[in-house]
Amino acid sequence: MHDRKSLSLAAELRRNLRAEFPAVARLSVSDPDFMEAMLDYAARSQSSMVQAAALTLRSQLEGTGYLQTPSPAKAEPGEGAQGINRTAHKRRIYRGRVIEDPE
């Protein structure tokens, strides 16, 4: 569950997004991916106020541990471009998290 500050930031972001994206009104706080959906809409927004609110919400969620920043992939020395492409196929980003694909 989310803390009070995250929910108030999400409510502010939702109010700001409603004019640009009417579908935001149908999102429910009880949905498991509510925060990710809000941040996704904010990323597509043209409003600088919305993007600032989303940045604040994202930093709050990362601080509480709900969102984790993906760590950059380390390339081994001596690998060519083919080695980089090979590691790119093993990793995907899903809902802001790096996921290793099983081979």
Image (cartoon, rainbow, N blue to C red):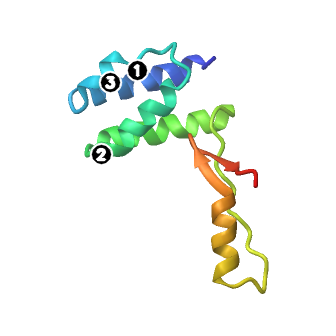
Left or right of residue 65, residue 13 in this image: left
Secondary structure of the residue carrying tag 3 is helix
Secondary structure of the residue carrying tag 1 is helix
Left or right of residue 19, residue 59 in this image: right
Q: How many marks?
A: 3
As drawn, 97 above or below 33:
below
Secondary structure of the residue carrying tag 2 is helix
As drawn, 44 above or below 31:
below
Residue 68: image location, x then y, percent: 66, 42
Single out the residue that lies furthest toward the front. 103
Task: Give the class, few, some or many, for how many residues have Cα within 10 Å of label 2's Cα (few <14, many ≥20).
Answer: few
The reply to whether callout 1 and callout 3 are in contact (CB within 8 Å) is no
- Please name whichever residue, 3 or 42, is drawn nearer the observer in this view of the structure: 42
Residue 60: image location, x then y, percent: 57, 34
Foreground disc of the pair 1, 3: 3
Mark 3 is on which residue type?
Answer: Val
Q: Which mark is residue 11?
A: 1
Mark 2 is on which residue type?
Answer: Ser
Image quadrant in which you'd find residue 43: top left
Query: Gap in Å between the C-alphas at discs 2 and 1?
Result: 17 Å
Residue 5: image location, x then y, percent: 54, 22
Identify the mark nearer the N-term, 1 or 3.
1
Q: Residue at x 59, y 33 (%)?
A: 61
Q: Which mark is residue 24?
A: 3
Identify the mark nearer the N-term, 2 or 1.
1
Which residue is disc 2 drawn over? 48
Identify the mark nearer the N-term, 2 or 3.
3
Task: Give the class, few, some or many, for how many residues have Cα within 10 Å of label 1's Cα (few <14, many ≥20).
Answer: some
Query: Gap in Å between the C-alphas at discs 2 and 3?
Result: 18 Å
Dividing the image into 4 quarters, which one contains the C terminus? bottom right
Left or right of residue 58, residue 66 in this image: right
Image quadrant in which you'd find residue 45: top left
